Amino acid sequence: MSEVAVVVDPGTVAVEVDVSVVEVLVDVQSVEVVVDAQTVDVVVDVASIDVVVSATAPRGQVGDLPTATTAVALTRGNLVTLNASSQLVLATAVFAAGRWDVVATAAADALALTTVGLNVDSLFRVPMLFDTPPPASANGSHVFLSATPGVATLTPPTTAGNAIFLLGTLAGADGAEAAPLAHFRPQFIAYKPA
């Protein structure tokens, strides 16, 4: 746990922190805190504020993360499931591959046969990797598991033999980020028979 103390004159101050857990301790009657998982803007009409920052969790996640061993190399935001050896593999909508049941997203890049943190909590936004960064106008759209292993898509798969697996709702797209934040609420929808 690292701490950052910010002392300000009355007015507006923006503090940008590239971590996910930000606990703001303020001894005032009124404070507005807006968290978008990348930037925390705190507007306070006081002379000082202490911001306590924890770098143990990725953006959009609170607390310590569960971990698992990878069977393959992963990129932050990859959609993963478990193989028969309980190792992480890339999830895919291709039903015959047997890897459509998404259990988490990778919290960081990881080499094969290493341990990586997992984003599994459906109460928070987690990074989800896309082939192409979705535009900001797509925020609020449903996110689905793609037939491309480990990748999310805004379009449900229509090819015979694919699973339609809803991952959640896009919340942090800006057109530039390949792994924008999404509300993670995984749910199997249907199987497209071959």
Image (spheres, rainbow, N blue to C red):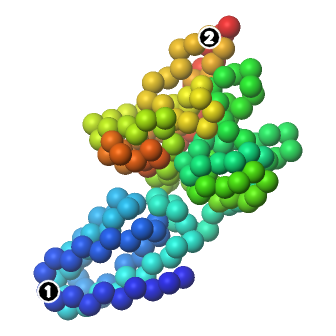
Q: Earlier in the sequence, mark 1 or mark 2?
A: 1
Q: Which residue is mark 1?
A: 10
- The quadrant of the picture occupied by the C terminus is top right
Q: Position of residue 167 (x, y in %)?
A: 53, 37
- Residue at the farthest right position: 85
- Residue at the farthest left position: 11
Q: Position of residue 34 (x, y in %)?
A: 29, 64
Q: Classify residue 170 by image quadrant.
A: top left
Q: Residue at x 27, y 37 (%)?
A: 137
Q: Residue at x 56, y 36 (%)?
A: 151
Disc 2 marks a residue whose amino acid type is Ala
Which label is found at residue 100?
none
Q: CA distance from mark 1 to mark 2?
A: 61 Å
Q: Can I make out residue 155 in this image?
A: yes
Query: Circle 1 — which element?
Result: loop
- The quadrant of the picture occupied by the N terminus is bottom right
Disc 1 marks a residue whose amino acid type is Pro
- Residue 30 falls left or right of residue 25: left
Q: Can I make out residue 33 in this image?
A: no
Q: Residue at x 38, y 71 (%)?
A: 17
Q: Which residue is mark 2?
A: 160
